[in-house]
Image (spheres, rainbow, N blue to C red):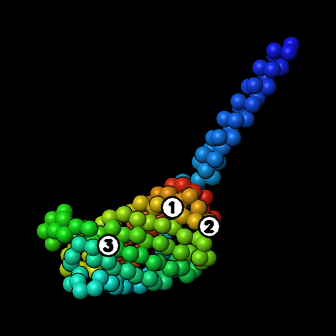
Amino acid sequence: MRSANALQHRLGFMLLLVTGLLWPAWSAALAAEPGTVFAVTHAATDTTLVTAGSDGHKLGDTRVVSLPTRDKSGAAGRLDSVLITTGIDTPGPGDEVRIGHLVFTFGSDSDQIYVGGTAVYPAKGATIKVATSVVRPILGGSGKYAGASGWCETEHLPDGSWGHTFHLTGGKPTL
C-alpha cells in the first residue's frame, strides 16, 4: 500500500512538473486567435533620407518616416519606421534591397506590432512602386498584441496612399 501511495505521489509530482514547464507554451497556443486580419491606412508619403552627403543610392542609406494611420473604424494610430539600404543593383540592375523596421502603434502607446524584413525597391524611388506590395513577417507585439506573429502586407495603392494588412497567427489580440 505504501509503495502504491509513493508511486501516486511521484506520478502526481511529475505531472505537476511537466505541466508547469509546458503550461506557458500550451497557454500561448490556446490564447492564439489564428486568422485575425485587420488593416490600417495612411495618406501618401515619402520617406526622409537622413544619411548625410548621400544621393540616396548608397549602401547604408537610412530613411525614416513617422505618420498617423487609421483603421476601418477611423481609430487613429501611428507608424514609425526605418529603412536601411543593404543592396545596390540587387536582385537586378536598378533595384535596391532595404531592411525595414516598422512599428505600428494602435491607440495606447503600449499596443504595438513590430514588423521587419527586406523588400526590393526601385533605386530611383524612395518607396516601393505604386500598385505594388511587399510582405514582411510580424516579429512581435506588446500590450493587447503581446506575442503577435504572422505577416503584414504593405500596399502602395494606386492613389498614392498606403494600406497595411496584418495577418495574425499568434498572440491574443483584443480588437
Identity of the residue drawn at 28% across and 77% down: 61
Residue 29 vs 125, above or below: the answer is above
Residue 11 vs 118, above or below: the answer is above
Mark 1 to mark 3: distance in Å?
20 Å
Which quadrant is home to the N terminus?
top right
Labels 1 and 3: the sequence-earlier one:
3
Question: Which disc is residue 140 wearing?
Answer: 1
Q: Position of residue 137 (x, y in %)?
A: 41, 60
Task: Please state if 17 lies on the left or on the right of 119 as rendered.
Answer: right
Identity of the residue drawn at 50% across and 79% down: 78
Mark 1 to mark 2: distance in Å?
11 Å
Identity of the residue drawn at 48% across and 67% down: 114
Identity of the residue drawn at 56% across and 58% down: 147
Task: Please state if 45 lies on the left or on the right of 34 as rendered.
Answer: left
Which amino acid is tagged 2?
A: Gly
Residue indicated by mark 3: 84
Q: Position of residue 49 (x, y in %)?
A: 31, 84
Which quadrant is home to the C terminus?
bottom right
Task: Please state if 14 lies on the left or on the right of 3 as rendered.
Answer: left
Task: Choose mark 3 or mark 2, whichever is in front.
Answer: 3
Specify the farthest residue to the front.
Answer: 52
Q: Residues within 10 Å of mark 3 (few under 14, many from 20)?
A: many
